[in-house]
Image (tube, grey):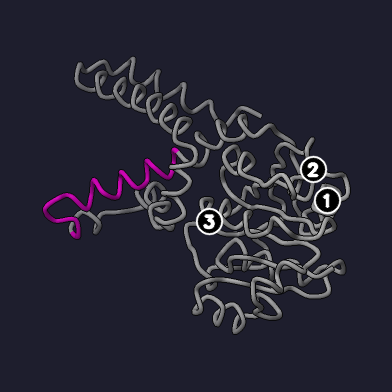
Amino acid sequence: MTIGIVGLGLIGGSLGLALQDTKLVSKVLGYDHNLTNCEDALSLNLIHEIVSFDEIKKCDIIFLAIPVEAIIKTLDLLSDVDENTTIVDLGSTKSKIIKSVPDSIRANFVAAHPMAGTEKFGPHAAFKTLYQNKIVVFCDTKHTADFHKDRATQIFSHIGMRIVFMEEDEHDKHASFISHLPHAISYALANSVIGQEDPKSILLLAAGGFDDMSRLAKSSPTMWSDIFKQNRENLLNSLELFEKELLTCKEMIKDQKWDELENWMGNATTLHKIS
């Protein structure tokens, strides 16, 4: 099969590397509106060749590894592809994207979210094993033709992913807690420190805890502002619940309720015991 990847950053570039190791794929073609990304992707051997968008449309499978708002615009440009061309979006939100798929290619379309990534972005962030032993979520497959669903399943399985099926609304609600909320918190923490009179001195004391919490704030603002926009209602709900817990913590500290605070913390430690 010939693969076309639109977007050659961490997600698309890592996919290109992984697919080149499978016997299913004969050629990996790439397209990116950023010419520097195209040059870097070629020099890093993330893909075999850079081609025009028209050439991408002729591929057996097209992966959309671009910001979620751009995915919607690009789907309109793919509305005339052949019925045997599989289109897979790799966006972090699903409901709005699925609602935006043109009717002419709905049977071709696989809504997928690989639960993989880092805080880094761009072609130089790509690495071959990003997807190994990770989960990919398929949403709303009842409207996807079996041929395309099976093809996508085969591809993701060959790069080491486990497939989970979920409705798009459920996916977006869950993603708001385990992915989108942590990014919002990380950006807020980073801005809290940047807003101090001498952030450089504060950062001299930074150790594991701060590094872990602030790492996500290195992520692409372009990508994440689009995600927040598309999953606005779910993210607002998760932020309100987080604010409630943070206020509870604040009040216990303010009122010196140390036993209650310890119990509250103890309850939090049970999260990672849930299987």
In this view of the protein, which residue sits in the foreground, 249 or 144? 144
User: Label 1's element?
Assistant: helix
Query: On the image, which quarter does residue 86 sit in?
Result: bottom right
Q: Amino acid at mark 3?
A: Ala
Work out whether residue 275 or residue 39 is closer to the camera in this orientation and state it. Answer: 39
Numbered badge on residue 227 = none
- In the image, residue 35 lies at what x, y percent? 51, 78
Between 197 and 275, which is closer to the camera in this rendering? 197
Q: How far apart are labels 1 and 2 at the CA level? A: 7 Å
Compare residues 188 and 64 and report the one nearer the observer.
64
Crowdedness of circle 2 by 10 Å Cα count: few (<14), some, many (20+)?
A: some
Q: Position of residue 21 (x, y in %)?
A: 79, 71
Judging by the rendered image, the residue that carries numbered circle 3 is 70
* Residue type at numbered disc 2: Thr
Q: Is residue 198 magenta?
A: yes
**Tag 3: Cα neighbours inside 10 Å, few (<14), some, or many (≥20)?**
some
Q: Is residue 106 above or below residue 36?
A: above
Residue at image position (37%, 25%) is: 240
Residue on which disc 2 sits: 144
Kindly identify the residue that appears in the image at 29 percent across and 23 percent down: 247
Residue 261 against residue 144 in the figure, above or below: above
